[in-house]
Image (spheres, rainbow, N blue to C red):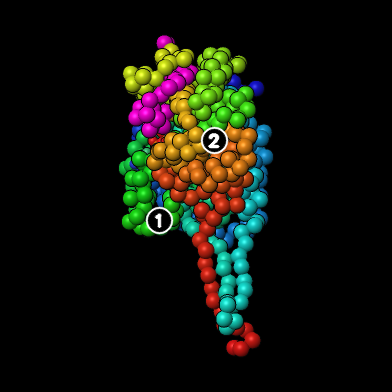
Amino acid sequence: MTTEAELLAKVPTQLFIGGDWVDSTSGRAIAVHDPATGMVLLSIADASVEDAAAAMDAAADTQASWAATAPRVRGEILRRAFDLMQQRADEFALLMTLEMGKPLAEARGEVTYGGEFLRWFSEEAVRISGRYGKNPEGTGRMIVTHLPVGPSYLITPWNFPLAMATRKIAPAIAAGCTAIIKPAELTPLTTLYFAKLLDEVGLPKGVLNVLTTSTSREVSAPIIADPRLRKLSFTGSTGVGQTLLKQAADTVLRTSMELGGNAPFVVFEDADLDKAVDGAMLAKFRNIGQACTAANRFIVHSSVADEFASKLTERVKALKIGRGTEEGVAIGPLINAGAVDKADSLVQDAIARGAQLLTGGTRVAGDGSFYEPTVLTEVVAGSDILREEIFGPVVTIIPFTDEADAVAKANDTEYGLVSYVFTRDLARGQRLIESLQTGMMGLNVGVVSNAAAPFGGVKQSGVGREGGLEGIHEYLETKYVLTPDPFSS
Ligand code: NAD
């Protein structure tokens, strides 16, 4: 078993540009912290605008040769990356726990989920198909083919340091696109370690470039404005996504936007309440509540709301808080002190407006940014906590009266990423598939993510889908060709 110090010694601390690990021209460094202790884990390169230009040159210069590389070769690089990731699963898991704080068991789960994108897209690389057929008039032949979009800029958030990177890098590689990835400055180590792995399995120089920076806006703007860039894929908050969409408009970039969420978790009176509570624990407390898919509002039929609240509270009180590396810990730290302040202010606002506190509701004293898992019930309409992403371990319960009331409450948000519904009534479940305004839905389950499924949202939760059959098309252009009827020419 690799120790923390041995692992950190293996993680690159430089920028990865054109296949070489290089120092930043800025001369600055970013200190990466362990949110459980506040200690510095590593200091890494802090990219400048000049470094961004070098990464853009590398991605643009490599595009033609990478697009010309056989799909099988591209797929096999991804497959080797998948295999090597399995061998290093414990290391990747520990690294994520150190820099992000999630419990080790969950970090292992993310290695499985994140690794699956490598395997899935290794298989998709050789299945980029087209069409050939007569036009309706019979006067010509129509050819439809798919070509790589071109150099892509990938921006990822801190909450899933591996999966958000592989979910973008794997389809880009499979499709024949070169890329620059900019991980979040709070958790860049996993991406650096993953880039090292891709280098080891033979990814040609320049296909993937990594920029770590504390000045995301300054470094990203010239890349996004560069006419050689053809694609921007972003996962993060809706506010930053809106800014990037405006920037992308100038060069009419293809964009994929995986943005924020405010997931409703609807429990009907006919639901299996124990299964609903199991689902709720996953949908709320995975990643310490810091997931775009986290259930933000529990909308529960008034006849079962008290029972649901008390069963859930019992489970929540048993959750162990601590550093993610400790055995049995379910609630690690939030990413930083600001995240604790935000969660606490939302909780205090809800209580001030009349919500009942069943457990939690306070920060944990000491080093690290911990917040007690919390359950609030009878949360009053208009409370900030129902409108904003909580991004912390806080349950809010709101009662409803009938199906129409549940649907209206669930859809009362500008977000539309995912919804969860618990009911034993099949027809009702089918009605909700169509009436809930979300890109994804968990019907009697509390987690939906799967590399084989199209992940993404509607409304202000985003544009495009990652994973599934759809995922590779985010990195492909469709080209249509017409030729004359070969029998009459
Ligand atoms: P964030 O928007 O603050 O940052 C995301 C990334 O964008 C980071 O790498 C950051 O450095 C970069 N960034 C910030 N401002 C930028 C700018 N002006 N130009 C270029 N880059 C910029 O989000 P976060 O706090 O890292 O992540 C949490 C958010 O991500 C939540 O809203 C969550 O819902 C969302 N999220 C969405 C999904 C999804 O698939 N829909 C998945 C995970 C997280």
Does residue 368 show up magenta in the picture? yes
User: Would you say residue 412 sits in the magenta stretch?
Assistant: no
Residue 450 against residue 177 in the figure, above or below: above
Q: Nearer the viewer, residue 56 or 114?
A: 114
Residue at which label 1 appears = 253
In the image, is the residue at mark 2 within 8 Å of ligand 1 by its beta carbon?
no
Along the line of sight, which residue is nearer the eye, 302 or 112? 302
Q: What is the quadrant of the C terminus in the image?
A: bottom right
Residue type, mark 2 in image: Tyr
Q: Which amino acid is tagged 1?
A: Leu
State which region is magenta. Answer: 365-390
Q: Is residue 372 visible?
A: no
Q: Left or right: where does residue 199 sit relative to residue 366? A: right
**In the image, residue 361 lies at what x, y percent?**
42, 16
Would you name the residue on which mark 2 appears?
Answer: 420
Residue 164 location (% of width, % of height): 51, 39
Q: Quadrant of residue 162?
A: top right
Mark 1, residues whose alpha carbon is within 10 Å: few (<14), some, or many (≥20)? some
